[in-house]
Image: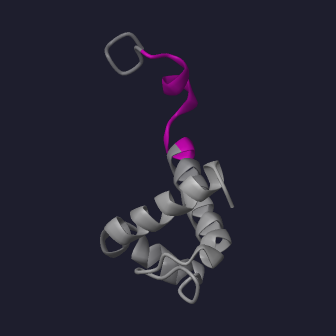
Amino acid sequence: MPGEFHFMGHCYFAFNRLWYDDLTGWAVDICGFDKTVKRDTEDMSYFTHFDRFYTLLTLSNYDRFFWSIRLDYASRPNAGYGDV
């Protein structure tokens, strides 16, 4: 797995090591990735599981933020500053 994907694997593992306890550990348990996404691992054979988990986490956060912002505010940068 050379190049960009190899770099992504190391990014996933580094992020996991740094933020597992504070940000992602609860999501690992809830999503059922607790058997494959471990706090301390650098085994590239788990890359696919880490990739799927962090993609799922990113998309779910995007979805949550997208639906919590009113589209009329998002389409007008000055909305909310008295120019509504």
Q: Residue furthest top?
A: 83
The percent coordinates of residue 15 (x first, y second) are 41, 62
For the N terminus, the image quarter is bottom right
Magenta range: 66-77
Relative height, residue 84 to residue 43 (above, below): above
Q: Residue furthest front?
A: 2
38 or 28, which lies in front? 38
Residue 60 visible in the displayed image = no
Q: Quadrant of residue 21?
A: bottom left
At a point 47% along the width and 67% down the height, the residue shown is 13
Task: Give left or right: position of 83 versus 5.
Answer: left
Query: Does the magenta stretch mainly form a helix, a strand or a loop?
Result: helix
- What colouring style does the render use? one colour
Q: Quadrant of residue 50?
A: bottom right
Relative height, residue 17 to residue 75 (above, below): below
The percent coordinates of residue 78 (x first, y second) are 40, 14
The percent coordinates of residue 84 (x first, y second) are 42, 14
The percent coordinates of residue 35 (x first, y second) are 57, 89
At a point 50% along the width and 78% down the height, the residue shown is 28
At a point 42% along the width and 18% down the height, the residue shown is 79
Task: Give left or right: position of 4 versus 84.
Answer: right
At a point 37% along the width and 71% down the height, the residue shown is 17
Residue 50 visible in the displayed image = yes
